[in-house]
Amino acid sequence: MKFDVVTIFPRMVIAGLAEGVVSRGIARGLLDVAVHDLRDHTTDRHRTVDDVPYGGGPGMVMKPEPLARAVEDIRTRRGNPEAVVLLTPQGRSFTQLEAVRMSRLSHVVLLCGRYEGMDERVRELVATDELSIGDYVLSGGELPALVVIDAISRLIPGVVGDEQSVEQDSFSNGVLDYPHYTRPAEFGGVRVPDVLMSGHHADVRRWRRKTALARTLERRPELLERAALDDDDRALLDEIRQSTMGSAAQADPANRKE
Ligand code: ADE
């Protein structure tokens, strides 16, 4: 899969690609990531990429021409991308589902914004998609671009060594991950749950699914509305609700007997 990143901080992006899963994917020839300095597509002596906003107000706005030229140059030298993505807090949410969809593409361009924003005509004429990595404001799209590349890359067969571990990841089936333990059997006075050391694979599977569902119900109940749940899952959720309702009722001061 091919990625092109357009940024005014190429070294920041290159540094983020140099370690871990993404760098291994690049070394194995499964990923081809090119980082482009937006200033190389300016035409003035000062290599200007921003300007004051029409209508006044604070901050600067990224000019449309260098961005449009950078994408044109990518089309000429690297081929036509299937998506030109603008990273912005105004975009639709980048989720695991979105990562799965994008992992089926073969060429994606990522445009990193800086300053107060980008000229609206970049959205209209250059970008095909706008993505946000979360409801918070970062100082630019460079970290979001790295986040997007990482999440997509690990879904490409061969990039992560262990396919099974990718399939079992948190969110890949719409619920949070179960708790993990390794040796020692006791640490800081906390023992590994007996079931994990019992050797009963069916019990282990059930315990893991139940704790995953319980965590999701407690921390991210909204995920359960869209998760792929079967009858066994629903039965486990009923069990969880029964037992937590009892303890929640006890913990709730409104229900306490005087
Ligand atoms: N640029 C600044 N903040 C961002 C965010 N949350 N997601 C994507 N791009 C951004």
Image (cartoon, rainbow, N blue to C red):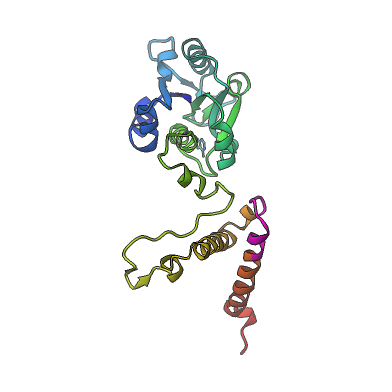
Q: Is residue 90 visible?
A: no
| Quadrant in the picture for residue 142 | top left
| Quadrant in the picture for residue 98 | top right
| Quadrant in the picture for residue 42 | top left
Q: Position of residue 143 (x, y in %)?
A: 43, 36
Residue occupying the point 49% across, 63% down: 204
Would you say residue 39 sits in the magenta stretch?
A: no
Q: Position of residue 1 (x, y in %)?
A: 48, 25
Residue occupying the point 60% across, 28% down: 129
Start-end of magenta stretch: 225-235
Would you say residue 234 sits in the magenta stretch?
A: yes
Q: In which quadrant is the C terminus drawn?
A: bottom right
Give the tally of numbered discs. 0
Q: Is residue 150 visible?
A: yes
Horizontal side of residue 222 vs 76, given as left or right: right
Residue occupying the point 48% across, 12% down: 73
Q: Is residue 253 above or below residue 105?
A: below
Q: Is residue 29 above or below residue 231?
A: above
